[in-house]
Image (cartoon, rainbow, N blue to C red):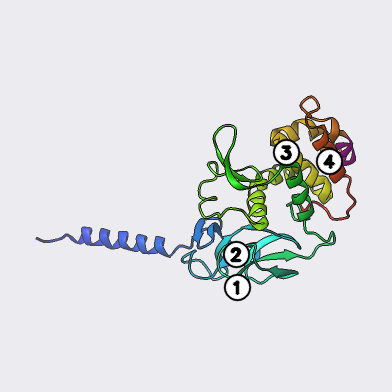
Amino acid sequence: MKVSAALIALAAAVSQVQAATHLLPRAVGDSCTAPEGKGTCQNTSNCAGISYPTGLCPNDPTNVQCCVKISCSTSSGSGYCRSVSNNGCSGGTFISGACPGSSDIRCCVKSSGGGTGGGDGHIDQYSINHLKSLEGVRRYFYYDSVGKKTIGVGHNCDAHPGTCDNLVEPLTDAEIDRLLRMDLQIFETCVCKMANASLMNKYQFAALVSFAFNSGCGGASRYFADEMKSKSFSKICTDLPTTNTLNGLLTSRRTKEKELCQKATTVKSGC
């Protein structure tokens, strides 16, 4: 059976298009999967976490690698898990025992003028401990009032599939902090999106994140949007003890949030 010249030409053209498509680099921001979890393809200079040089972003330039951002907490402060051999910890110190994976993956804690981390759009270790004292800590699995499997500082395993699969009871302090930092990210992000959040100091920011963790992102915006717009951060601190206290049930918590909010520091929120 003879094949026409036109069909041969068409097949060749399709083959060339497929080859060209295969050679196109993956766009920065595309998803990727690494041993320590899911991430995105990023320029290595923009990756705060672990970057993998092993072809997880195929066809990209060598400076675009799979970046997995995992928060970590230590007694020396908070940071991100990074590879000792591939990423380094410029301006900080590697601390073992706070990150998943091999011994090459350690917590990179940056030096900070405040002495306990923070100033990077995340609350510092002092504020993490403060929040744990307000919320309470459970080292063993339990089921909450609506039947959800829970552990740590109210970490909902059902809402975050896979995050509890490899946990061993009782949880260590590092595991409790890791889960809490994971859960806090949504609240840190929504507070950072409020007007003038970058001008707050790290303890004003931490107090508002604590409020959002308890009252929701909508609550933080509803009660304090005007103060944020007018940069009245000190007023937020003084108003906390009388804001959304559930008829006095949360007055003690709000008073402690006020004390955190008024803690002196020159370090900004980092939003």
Q: CA separation, marks 2 and 1?
A: 8 Å
Label 4 packing within 10 angstroms: few (<14), some (14-19), many (20+): some
- Camera-near label (3 vs 2) is 3
Q: Earlier in the sequence, mark 4 or mark 3?
A: 3
Give the residue number, with chain letter if any, for mark 4.
256
Give the residue number, with chain letter if any, for mark 2.
50
Give the residue number, with chain letter if any, for mark 3.
212
**Residue beneath the point at 50% across and 52% down:** 165
Residue 215 visible in the shown view:
yes
Q: Amino acid at mark 1?
A: Asn
Label pair 2/1, CB-CB below 8 angstroms: yes
Q: CA separation, marks 1 and 4?
A: 42 Å
Q: Determine the secondary structure under disc 4.
A: helix
Q: Amino acid at mark 4?
A: Lys
Q: Determine the secondary structure under disc 3.
A: helix
Q: CA separation, marks 3 and 2?
A: 29 Å
Which image quarter is the N terminus in?
Answer: bottom left
Q: Position of residue 62 (x, y in %)?
A: 54, 71
- Camera-near label (2 vs 4) is 4
Label 1 packing within 10 angstroms: few (<14), some (14-19), many (20+): few
- Camera-near label (3 vs 1) is 3
Label pair 4/3, CB-CB below 8 angstroms: no
Give the residue number, with chain letter if any, for mark 1.
86
